[in-house]
Amino acid sequence: MKIHSMGAGFALLAGLLTAPFAHAAGGAEVRTETLLKTERSWDGELYKAYPHGQPELTLVRITIPAKTSLPWHRHPSPNAAYVVSGELTVESRDGKHRKLLRAGDTLAEMAGSQHRGVTGDKPVELLVFYAGAAGVPLSVKTE
């Protein structure tokens, strides 16, 4: 009997722990959508290890004016971008990779390799999530 009660207790606990993710207040269902899940950056390279040190997460909103070329740069840590609006072409410095991104697209950024973004006729708004370490810069110019 105790085993049955403990099993029911665990089932109840599991249900309570997952319930906040299934329904919001008032019974509305919460939806989740994975926008990006990858082990590779957009050029196909596997991500290496994260930087050493205290983990630090950063979420940045970046607005880039129309007809702008960002400087060549690299990222010391893995990061991912979500295009809120506009169109952005990303390209590798070696000229081997180029990709056009539009609103709603995601990008697993290159880590360690030189690249840049170039906007079109409209400004671009990005949300970029960096999974780095305290004291490690988000981006490093390489010009």
Image (cartoon, helix red, strand yellow):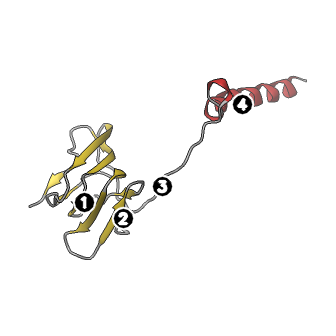
User: Considering only order in the chain, which callout, 2 or 1, is on the residue closer to the N terminus?
Assistant: 2
Report helix, strand or loop for mark 1: loop
Per the image, the residue denoted by label 1 is: 112
Residue occupying the point 19% across, 69% down: 93
Mark 4 vs 2, N-terminal side: 4
In three-dimensional space, the C-alpha distance between marks 4 and 2, rounded to whole angstroms, equals 38 Å
Nearest to viewer (mark 1 / mark 2): 2
**Residue at image location 59% in from the left, 41% down from the top:** 31
Labels 4 and 1 touching (C-beta < 8 A): no
Quarter of the C terminus within the rendering: bottom left
Q: Amino acid at mark 1?
A: Gly
Question: Which of the numbered marks, if any, corresponds to residue 37?
Answer: 3
N-terminal of the two: label 3 or label 4?
A: 4
Q: Are marks 1 and 2 in contact (CB under 8 Å)?
A: no
Residue type at the position of mark 3: Lys
The disc label shown at residue 42, or none:
2
Q: Residue furthest bottom?
A: 96
Q: Quadrant of residue 107?
A: bottom left
Mark 4 residue crowding within 10 angstroms, few (<14) / some (14–19) / many (20+): few
